[in-house]
Amino acid sequence: MKRMFRGWTWEATLAVLILLCAAWATSLSPFYLDPDQILYSLQQALAVAGLLAGGLMMIVIAGEIDISLPATLAMGTIVFARMAEAGLPLWLALPTVILLGVCAGLVNGLLVVGFGLPSLAVTLGTMSAYRALALWFGGQEGHADFPASYIWLGSATLFGALPLSLLLLAAIFALLALVLHGTVFGRLLYMIGANPVAMRFSGIRVGAVKVAAFAAAGGITGLAALVYVGQFESARADNAGEILLFVVAAVTLGGIDVFGGRGHVAGVFLALLLLGTIKNGMGLANLPGPVQTLILGALLVGSVAIPQLARLRLRPRRGAANPDAAGVPRPAVPPHGAREEKT
Amino acid sequence: MSATAAPRSDRLVFAMLQGRVFGVAAFLVLLCLGFGTASRNFLTVSNANTIALNGAILVVVACAEAIVVITRNYDLSVGSVVALSSYVGLDVVRRYPEAGPILILAPVLIGTACGAFNGFLVAVCRLPSVIATLGTMSIFRGLAFLYAGGHQIDPKDLPPWVAATVGGHVLGLSALVLLGFAIAVLAALGLRYLSVGREIYAIGSNPDAAPFYGLRSERISFRAYLICGTLTGLAGFLFGGRVSYVVPYLAQGLELTALAAVVLGGISVLGGSGSVFGAALGALTIATIENGLILLGASEFVRQFIYGAIIVLAVITDAVVQQRVRVLLKARRQRVRAA
Amino acid sequence: MTDETQLRRLAHRMDRRAWLKLALGTGLSLPAVAALLESSGIAVADTGLRIFMVPKFTGFIFFELARAGGEQACKELGATLTYVGTTTADVEGQVQVLQNLLPQKPDGIVIAALDINAPVPALRQARNRGAIVVTFDSDVAEAGRDVFVNMAPFEVQAKAMLDSALANAPDGGKAVWVAPTPTVANFISQKKAIDAVIASDPKYQSIQFVDTLYANDDPDKSYSVGTSAMQANPDLKLFISGSGISTPAINKAIMDTGRQGKVFATGFALPSTMKTYLDNGTCRQFALWSPYKFGYMATYMSAMVKAKKISDKPGETVDVPTIGKRTIEATSIVNLNSMLFFTKEHPDFDNAVSANI
């Protein structure tokens, strides 16, 4: 039993924090501890952001980043809107949008891999480009009046209480867990993130794997666009304008090392629950906006710092200045000269 | 190594350094030519001055961010530090208008304090820098809003020396542009010749080897964040002073722009390489793009699309130029060895 | 037992201690948070109506003034006002704020919406549970609200800005429209109204718009955009903006580039920010309504409709204290219609000139 839980310290910490924050939320507001309320709030906070976090997770594990996912989402919602207005059925629209997401991811991936470009810069550029496309295709004004079939996924509940979109999120995360931890592709993602140079010499098609990760994330984002449309019953070119922060926080808080090669799906799921719980609790208590911002930042920092400080009290001093989220210094990396190729 | 190889390898190193910056510089020139042909108002002294002024503060922030990135860390809190140092610092100025320019220390010190906090989290608590600075981004922004309490600082609240300092001219050149240039030069020289600078490159380049050389990487990354905070605090004063209108929600998204400038400037996000000049040029490139797009007179969608496309093109150009330089260096090295 | 195992067990215990510390810390911080809540003035009321005001984003002085007006209205009516919102213009965040209001069963929601459609599902639920929803500044689709309080009909807003423009530059000239982003609905409506007014009224035909620029309600961006626009159009005469943040910033840009008297930036702005520019002549006139009265009126409407003292149907005339009689028009829109002009001689809310448009 102990062996199974070894290495799960980070996830365990998150789980404890979720319970603590739920307790804190209960003390802040009498409205919190209601199953309907909790499910509804989690659905609204996590259904879309969680899917994006799932997609981003794959990319970060491979050692890259993609900040254009929210812009891809906006393109998706606009295309749904246009297709709904044209009277096209959902079974035609959904694959189209997912394909659109995949293509957007492919563009990112091919640019990063084909030219060896830093993914932060590339996706910063494509983010603007995709937003521009959403603006061009969708216009300045918002779209509404979606048919019931489009709205169903994002708003329906099972047994009147369990939101379908949360189930979808859980299913996608289960799928991601299977892919990342049970397939060769998943293993390759981890290895590429941990040691790209060694992978290059091993004969594995590093580029293809990375492009696939970008494409998959784009596809998941297309699905997230449908959930968005269902939740808000609206689409506009500036959708998901501020969601990136939450998504990146969820991924890094979930234990995914931003330099790649480490992290577990469960961690990200738990981090999403933690952030969603905190926001819900603070919102119900009507805390002023700046106070919420402050507390969220403090909790983000504190929840990582306190266990870290405790752990460091014992461990003999090591030189590494950039340990990963679990507090273990990274394995030795090849000298800088070898890494130079990558940039 | 033969006796003749040493001076040649020095020149090679120099060429390599220049190569990193050469890519950005080349792209900037191409960009200016492109905009110049598209709009007749672009290639004028007046417009160049406008670009320099608009980009000067971003240059300072980009240099600050570059120093942190070179140590293989991120600082996502620069926007919030600018807002906090700008608001609180200029509020101090508002309260003591007689004290004069010495109060520029107020925003600078606040920025340094913020940098120290970031450094504490990353170096002492060993937090991953993304989490730490994502958190401090929210913390500092929240503090700025709470301090402001729903108010703002109006132009009438600030004493005239603020606008005079930021908008003034020295020897006919704008003080702001000179300041941006001075900071870029000082940062570049400091990183090259001061031991702190060398150490910053060292731990960014190979953090695991650093302790074997006797380098305390915690101390060095702390110092890097400290310097970054100081420069960002100064940028806060400049932001607030230039427009003379300070609100707690200013500079949102500045961190992304700063990172864009840094990456455009050829600094690797893996740390350990790149020149602060590159970051400064990257900042100027972004200012040029923003200015050029307005001069084009196209619709907003076209502007946004071209902005994204240019960023991608800039990075491609840099990568291609890097590749060329590397090939040339390899050829040279082989020639030296054959000789 | 090896040293390593001992160390590991010790580490485990230390982790447990760390969690204990965290729990203690959280527990000890609860009173601090409670104190913070008290000092922010968010106490649950015992009597009267509970009204929640949701701005576009908090910390923005327009909405802080509206909040003060709303609190005054609540004080006079024996109700309580709670002010909630996000710190950025976050569409999804604002909807989450509304969702967090639902379990609290508000009597009234007064909201300046960031998106016409996105808040509607949540607002619909709120209305189903008995809340009266009043939108102000930015409307939502009719299904989501009971009344929309506009500052003035868009045509009046347009004329106010254009009149101010002509007061600065009587011969008109080339103009640039400045807005936060392309998708903010009330700015789109303002621009449409401006174009319609220019097309139909010969008085304004000397004003020709050459571009629309976006400055994200950021002072520095507005400044940079202003300087670049002046480079792009050397004969530019006017910047017109409904954004109170862009106008003063561009005035500074005009001052710094020595173009006072040649280029003017006007539109809507707060008097405190513009005082300097009125005094030194960079700007001769701008317009605004009173955000304080705006918040007062919106909150007043919400409370009165909830208390069934007035109806929200078109045709109903409401006598709003300190503002006057206002009639609810078609689609349940009512206008504050207290547009003011500010000039050097009339630079504050107290002495501004009423714009009789």
Image: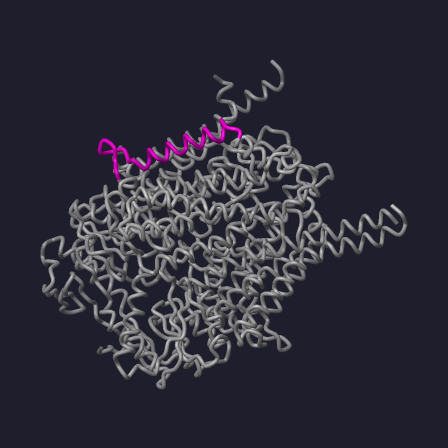
Q: Give the x, y percent position of residue B81.
A: 50, 54
> Which residue lies at the image location 44% right of the left edge and 65% below the top edge?
C219
User: Which residue is at the front of the view, C331 or A326?
Assistant: C331
Quadrant of the rendering where the N terminus of chain C is positioned? top right
Q: Which residues are magenta?
A: A156-184
User: Which residue is at the front of the view, A151 or C76?
Assistant: A151
Left or right of B118: which side holds B217?
right
Left or right of A190: which side holds B210?
right
Q: Is residue C116 visible?
A: yes
Left or right of B31: which side holds C211?
left
Q: Give the x, y percent position of residue A41.
A: 30, 40
User: Which residue is at the front of the view, C147 or A217?
Assistant: A217
Residue B152 falls within the magenta-colored stretch: no
Quadrant of the rendering where the C terminus of chain C is positioned? bottom left
Q: Is residue B29 positioned above or below A70 on the image?
A: below
Q: Is residue B231 visible?
A: no
The main secondary structure of the magenta stretch is: helix
Q: How is the image coloured?
A: one colour
> Which residue lies at the image location 54% right of the left edge and 30% below the top edge?
A187
Q: Give the x, y percent position of residue A127.
A: 47, 53
User: Which residue is at the front of the view, C48 or A143?
Assistant: A143
Left or right of B102: which side holds C128?
left
Residue A175 falls within the magenta-colored stretch: yes
